Image (cartoon, grey):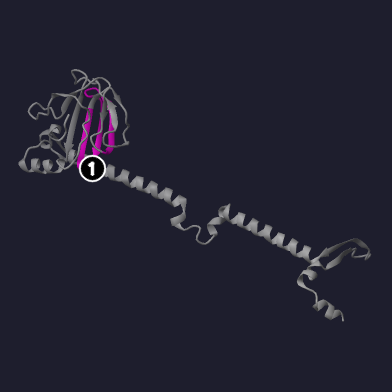
Amino acid sequence: MSEEYHQKKTFGEKLKESYQVKIVHEETLQETRSFRVSKAKVYLLASLAILILSALIVSLLFFSPLKRLVPGYADVNNNHKFFELNKKIEGLEEEVSEQTTYIEGLLNMISSPSAEGKLLDTEQNVGAIIGMLDQMFFVPPIKGSVEASYSIEKGHLGTDIVAPKNTPVKSVLDGFVISSDWTLENGNTISIQHKHNVLSIYKHNSVLLKEAGSMVKAGEAVAIIGNSGENTSGPHLHFELWFEGKAVNAENYINF
């Protein structure tokens, strides 16, 4: 009869069944404490324990270094640090490319036997230079009046441009600053290496705005026009343009 009674109970009724739990002293067998508990409470406490344990495990995995052990988490396509490192590598590659261009330009200049060897001395050189430079767009370093033009005969390998005081001097192309310093002869001078072995030089500035090693964009201010150095007769910019280790007439490619 008892078995039939238990079989007829529903699941909900079974959950309501209560049990008495007694705590007995091992040696004296004296009851020290007792309490009643139902199946529902047991299931509830077990579920809460499992839930808390699961929350602790998830927190440990995703908010501690152990998260790197989770399959798929360290996928480079979803790893923020990977993108940061990738950007740094791209920046370093660009710097190396610019420095390589700079070194090639220096090697071309150093390998020339004399200043005359750096100038346009053959029709073949002239044709090669015109063909390359005509395809490039140069930003005028400053806008002003040309005081002295490029002249091989006079040994004047640049163009002198007069402009108002405090006029900013701009980079003619994107490039890499290879020198930014003061010399007794030319005063504050800045030199910028560009792609395709193009080198631009800006002399007699009052202030230099960029340091050696800086990357600059075309049209970005790199200095302020001035009258520094001994080899000058007044405030102006002495601008030189070099290609493949040879000085060229900037007025052929830039409208000052």
Q: Which residues are magenta?
A: 174-202
Q: Amino acid at mark 1?
A: Lys
Please state if 229 lies on the left or on the right of 91 as rendered.
left
- Residue extending farthest top: 234
Find residue 122 and report its image quarter.
Answer: top left
Q: Position of residue 81 (x, y in %)?
A: 46, 50
* 64 w.r.t. 189: above or below: below
Provide the major secondary structure of the magenta segment. Answer: strand
SS category of the residue bearing label 1: helix
Choose between 4 and 222: the one closer to the eye: 4
Residue at numbered disc 1: 195
- In the rendered image, the quadrant that contains the C terminus is top left
- In the rendered image, the quadrant that contains the N terminus is bottom right
Q: Position of residue 252 (x, y in %)?
A: 12, 34
Please state if 68 lies on the left or on the right of 219 as rendered.
right
Q: Position of residue 120 (x, y in %)?
A: 9, 37
Q: Is residue 182 magenta?
A: yes
* 248 w.r.t. 149: above or below: below
Find residue 19 and report its image quarter.
Answer: bottom right
Choose between 114 and 240: the one closer to the eye: 240
Q: Is residue 222 magenta?
A: no
Counting the numbered discs, the total is: 1
